[in-house]
Every structure is written in structure tokens, then in C-alpha cells.
Image (cartoon, grey):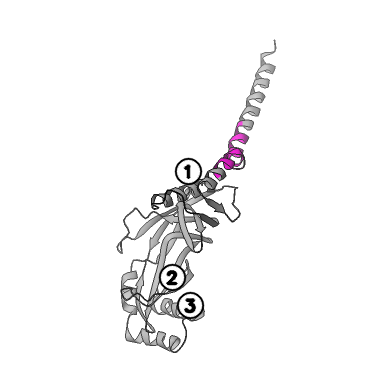
């Protein structure tokens, strides 16, 4: 028997086996997330009175975690901005005008320019009028931090206006964002929807689940709100998440990585 020839055949067979196993490992996620398993998740969501009114991305990619560094001088910069001189500049912009998105952005740009607050990750989100006498101002303007077109849940900056004056700024300003060396696999979006609905049910007293309409679900990041969040915290970690838009204007972030 030619042992040398047999040895070569065995090596080739092992190579083919390893290639096959590698292929199965790489495609396993797509197979699981596009077949019977997803049908089970969809049925479970229907049983919980959930309607999915949006496309669901099923090609699940790996994502970095984000190391966030905050501006060390944010508190001083914010406090220095509430001067009569600065507010008079804003009053000139706002005087006699309805606070539209255009006027708001002009004000905020002025704030950034004069205060030197870092803002490269901030994106305008909404204007909300608040008639509550206990609120920080009668108009709240919210900006949210984004990284590579993905929202960062739990990372907002609010500007409060009262009688054409800026009266308060809430939130921390991001100086820099660095990606982790390694990437982690994100979880199935249907699992994220089930997690969200389960959390929602805990807050409901009704035995019959109220109808929930999922309007959108996108890859995002979220800062773990369970960790200490204070003005003196200079860094944070944002984890991969699914941003779920639901009902009229609801939004929630569900951590989506597989440990």
C-alpha cells in the first residue's frame, strides 16, 4: 500500500471538511435568520398583538462598540454662554419670529460658534413646545448624537428657550468617538422586537396586550443607562442596538449584540 498517496488523500479530505465547516459557520446566521426560526418569532409577535409595518433587515453584520469621550470643559462653556451679550444675539435672531426649525438651527449654530462646544456628531431631532410651568423652558430643542448615520440612544442635548432667551442646556457634548478593535455579532431584529414588547407588557396592567405597530427598525447604538451618568463622567461606552420606532412617535433602543 502506498502510504504517501494515502496520506495525501487524507490531507485533502480534511481540507475539504474544514472548508465545508467554515462555510456552514459563516452561513449559519443567515440560514437561522431567514427560515423557520423567524416564522416562530413572527408568530409570537402576532400573538402579542404586534403589527410589523416596515421592512426588516435580515443580513446581520458585525458592529464595533464605541468608546465615547466627552468634552472636559462642557460645564464651564455652557455656564459662560448665559450672558446678556450672548442672549441679546439670540434675541435678534428670534425677535418677533415663530420658532421654526430654520430659526432654531440658526440659533444653535450661533451657540456652537460662540461657546466652542463640540458638535460634530449632533443632528437636529425635534422642537417641542412645553406649557408646563415647572419645565426648564417653554420651548425645548433636542439634538441627538449620531455615528456613521446610526443614532446613539441615550445621547441627547436639550436646549431650553424662554421668552426668546436661551435659559438652559442639558446633556453632555461628545468630543470624540473611537471604535473598538473587535466587532461583535448583532442579534436577530425579531428577538429585539420581542424583548421590547416584553418590557412594554411589564408596564401594562391590562391582561390583553395593547396593539403595537412597529414603524421601523434600524441598526443603532445605545449607552447603557444602568451605568452612572453624571456631569463629571468623561467617558462612556455605546453598544450595538436596534432602534425601534413604534406607534405614532415612540422610539426605543434595545441592545442587540450576542455575547
- Choose mark 2 or mark 3, whichever is in front: 2
Q: In this view of the protein, which residue sits in the foreground, 92 or 97?
A: 97
Residue 45's disc number:
none
Kindly state the secondary structure of the residue where label 3 is placed.
Answer: helix
For the residues marked 2 and 1, what is the alpha-carbon distance in whole angstroms?
31 Å
Q: Is residue 40 magenta?
A: yes
Placement of the N terminus among the 4 image quadrants = top right
Mark 2 or mark 3: name the one nearer the start of the chain. Answer: 3
The residue that appears at 47% across and 71% down in the rendered structure is 126
Q: 167 above or below 230?
A: below
> Magenta part mainly helix, strand or loop?
helix
Q: For the residue labelled by badge 2, is the local secondary structure a helix, a strand or a loop?
A: strand
Q: Which residue is mark 1?
A: 258
Q: Is residue 108 above or below residue 157?
A: below
* Residue numbers of the magenta segment: 21-41
Which one is nearer the viewer's eye here, 54 or 10? 54
- Note whether residue 188 is visible: no
Q: Which residue is mark 2?
A: 142
Q: Quadrant of the C terminus?
A: top left
Q: Nearer the viewer, mark 2 or mark 1?
A: 2
Q: Residues within 10 Å of mark 1 (few under 14, many from 20)?
A: few
* Spatial separation of the CA atoms under disc 2 and disc 3: 11 Å
**Nearest the camera: 88 or 189?**
189
Instruction: Answer with mark 2 or mark 1, whichever residue precedes in sequence.
Output: 2
Which mark is on residue 105? 3
Q: How far from the left and from the top, in percent, is residue 214?
A: 54, 56
Residue that appears at 65% across and 18% down: 7
Question: Residue 34, relative to residue 140: is it above or below?
Answer: above
Q: Residues within 10 Å of mark 2 (few under 14, many from 20)?
A: many
Amino acid at each position: 500500500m502506498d502510504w504517501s498517496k494515502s496520506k495525501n488523500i487524507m490531507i485533502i479530505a480534511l481540507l475539504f471538511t474544514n472548508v465545508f465547516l467554515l462555510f456552514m459557520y459563516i452561513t449559519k446566521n443567515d440560514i437561522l435568520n431567514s427560515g423557520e426560526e423567524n416564522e416562530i418569532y413572527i408568530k409570537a409577535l402576532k400573538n402579542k398583538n404586534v403589527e410589523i409595518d416596515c421592512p426588516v433587515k435580515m443580513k446581520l453584520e458585525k458592529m464595533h462598540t464605541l468608546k465615547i469621550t466627552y468634552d472636559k470643559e462642557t460645564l464651564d462653556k455652557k455656564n459662560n454662554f448665559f450672558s446678556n451679550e450672548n442672549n441679546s444675539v439670540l434675541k435678534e435672531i428670534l425677535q418677533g419670529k415663530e420658532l421654526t426649525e430654520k430659526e432654531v438651527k440658526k440659533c444653535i449654530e450661533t451657540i456652537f460658534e460662540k461657546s466652542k462646544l463640540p458638535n460634530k456628531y449632533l443632528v437636529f431631532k425635534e422642537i417641542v413646545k412645553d406649557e408646563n410651568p415647572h419645565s426648564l423652558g417653554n420651548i425645548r430643542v433636542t439634538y441627538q448624537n449620531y455615528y456613521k448615520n446610526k443614532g446613539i440612544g441615550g445621547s441627547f442635548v436639550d436646549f431650553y428657550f424662554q421668552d426668546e432667551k436661551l435659559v438652559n442646556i442639558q446633556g453632555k457634548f461628545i468630543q470624540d468617538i473611537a471604535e473598538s478593535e473587535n466587532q461583535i455579532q448583532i442579534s436577530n431584529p425579531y428577538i429585539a422586537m420581542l424583548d421590547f414588547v416584553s418590557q412594554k407588557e411589564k408596564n401594562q396592567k391590562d391582561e390583553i396586550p395593547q396593539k403595537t405597530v412597529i414603524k421601523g427598525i434600524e441598526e443603532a447604538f445605545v449607552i447603557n443607562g444602568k451605568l452612572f451618568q453624571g456631569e463629571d463622567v468623561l467617558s462612556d461606552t455605546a453598544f450595538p442596538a436596534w432602534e425601534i420606532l413604534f406607534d405614532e412617535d415612540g422610539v426605543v433602543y434595545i441592545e442587540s449584540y450576542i455575547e
